[in-house]
Amino acid sequence: MIDKIFVTKAAAEYEYSREICKRAGLKPELIRNDTAYREEVERFLPDPVGQGKRHLLLDVFRGGFFRKCPGTKGKVCCNYYVIDQTTNCPFDCSYCFLQSYLNLRAIRFAVNVEDLFRELEDVFRKHRFIRLGTGELADSLALEPLTGFGSKLMKFAIEFPGVVLELKTKSANVENLPDVHGKPGRGVIGWTMEPAHVVSLEERGTASLAERLEASVRAAEMGYGIAFHLDPVVFFPGFEEAYLDLVDQMFSCHKKLDWMSLAGFRYEPSLKGFVETRFPDSELLDGEFLRCSDGKYRYLFPERIHFFKRLVEKVKKLSPKTPVYFCMEDSRTWDLVMGKKALADPVLEPIFSKGGGDEKQGM
Amino acid sequence: MVKYFPIKQLRLDDRFRFHLGELPKNLIRSVSREGVLLPLIAVGEESPVLVDGYRRCALLSDSDVVAVRLLQDERTALLAAVELNMLGSAYSEMEKARLIAVVHENAWMTDREILDILLPRLGFKGGQSVLDACILVAELLQPSLFSVLAARKAPLKFALRLTGEAPDEQQVLANFFSCQRFSLSQMIQAVDLLVPVRKLGKRTFSAIIDELPREEGNALALLRQLRFPKATEIRIRLNSLLAPYRGKLSFPEDMEGDAFQFSCSIKNAKQALDCGRLLQEISEDAGLFQFLKGHVCDD
Ligand code: SF4
């Protein structure tokens, strides 16, 4: 998965860098900084996006690690906070927006995690309730066997009451995570779930559907809450039955999820070229799309509504207490699919609680 | 060193004809009025090979004498030509691609030199992947398609995408683009439509294109219908429903909506009455509300 490790001068000072190189069994190359990687390595790669995913760049990050998920203008926001400690990912999904988003192609991993923990401690002490995760610009557990970062972060965050930390992944790397039974915080492992057809065509290098389900059962046994993200829902011939079947499989493993999110596949025009050139067998762009007012392409509105209704109905039947929410959809879609009062449903309280911005009295 | 030569003493070499289009009009005028003012660039002292100035030379007669800047080797001459051209009539991306591929093929520079010197001078951002793209485009694009793309100043990315097509499909595209007199953006749209239509219908480009009418202007619209049958159906239905309301009633272009919008400006009582009548008509138009029900899947 990783075939080269680069260590910046600053990161070389950290014991954590040595630990990672040792676990990877790779001799690191020392470089000045990320710019040097760009100029001396990345520039000479025939396939910078693909090869960059096999390069791990250990670096020190000097800015803030923590931010509010930006959401999308006009879409319903779920008050999620994100930690940007790693950017990029060894997996290779055709729909991944990182292909057109990142300007450094290696996986950049910040080894100064103590700085992150200091920043987080400050945030956690000020908030009564906060839901956060690391899976915005990276897969939270893809590199776990090398870095053990997910475990470190979980061990730290789980000691704070009111903290809900989600590690979002497409891997099955849960065995080294700590047992979290009886801890004051809540640990959640979230998986992106796709029918096997989509996993095999669009998600190179990830765990299979069966492996993800098995891992989710193991994680639940270790005390974790489980979240599943049907994001992106990809339309292909027979997709409706495939996703409904997937929902069956999910709830045959878990009676109730901590949450489940839904989002139809959408894309910025800049992604298209990457899919066409890097994934010739992809079916991602085969559906009918229309360009929406935010510049993104989405499946036809009535088709989305129709399918989401069926899907939500099924989830509600199988697990009425599982909070289901839309990621990146506007309130109209919510109303049409879930009914006018959906957003006020107490089941969604853990998702939409504004606790993230709620400062504790007297602190 | 600059020397004067009669044109017929200059040896020509097609490898160096990088500019594929015509000279800009003002330059043609200037050359025919004043002759060639800026020295041409060539290599070799005794019988120099022309490296830059092919289009200007073509405007002169064999007996004309021109100033030629003589350089020692192809590498230096090419860099001088690039420098000069990037100041004035810069190369298009297709021309740059060919230039880079020629430099590479003739080993006038190492890969590293191409990346460090030539790409930046040509204003190409990127590294090895751009060099590889140039080589692929020069090697794999059929000459007919290459010329059509070059004539429309197509970007390297678009050309690269077409290198994946089989030679006969490339030929079909070249003919199609030329017959339809497509602009660059129309060519891109056409490929965006043709590729999925071919994939989903398991047909070749030529089978799809053969079914399109020959006249210019309709091909893209028809391809759009083939590519987006459901959206086309909705749009046709919507247009016929909205037609009686003379632009006063609308529905979002992207169809991301659960309601029609009505807009009407009222300056006097008569307009208010007209507007009321129209609203009354709309309220009795069952087709509109049926459409809406279907659109939001309200069963
Ligand atoms: S797992 Fe996530 S971050 Fe990694 S390639 Fe896939 S979509 Fe991108």
Image (cartoon, grey):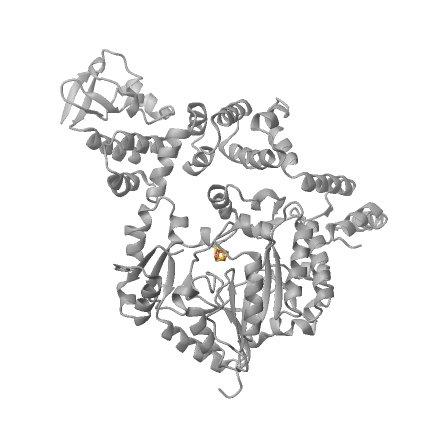
Residue B155 lies left or right of residue B212; in this view the side is left
Q: Residue furthest right?
A: B284
In the rendering, at what x and y percent does residue B269 appear? 81, 51
Q: Identify which residue is drawn at 29% across, 62% down.
A: A8
Query: Up-down: is B95 above or below A208?
Result: above
Query: Up-down: is A248 above or below A149?
Result: above
Q: Nearer the viewer, residue A324 or B82?
A: A324
Residue B105 lies left or right of residue A320; in this view the side is left
Residue A234 lies left or right of residue A207; in this view the side is right
Q: Quadrant of residue B23?
A: top left
Q: Nearer the viewer, residue A202 or B240?
A: A202
Q: Nearer the viewer, residue B120 or A104?
A: A104
Residue A78 appears in the picture as rendered: no
Q: Identify which residue is drawn at 56% across, 28% down.
A: B205
In the rendering, at what x and y percent does residue B274 appear? 81, 47
In the rendering, at what x and y percent does residue B62 appear? 25, 11
Q: Residue furthest top?
A: B63
Q: Residue furthest bottom?
A: A362
How many numbered circles does the render carry? 0
> Which quarter shows the N terminus of chain A?
bottom left
Residue B81 appears in the picture as rendered: yes
In the rendering, at what x and y percent does residue A356 appear? 54, 75
Q: Nearer the viewer, residue A351 or B183?
A: A351
Q: Identify which residue is drawn at 35% across, 65% down.
A: A23
Query: Up-down: is B165 above or below B31?
Result: below
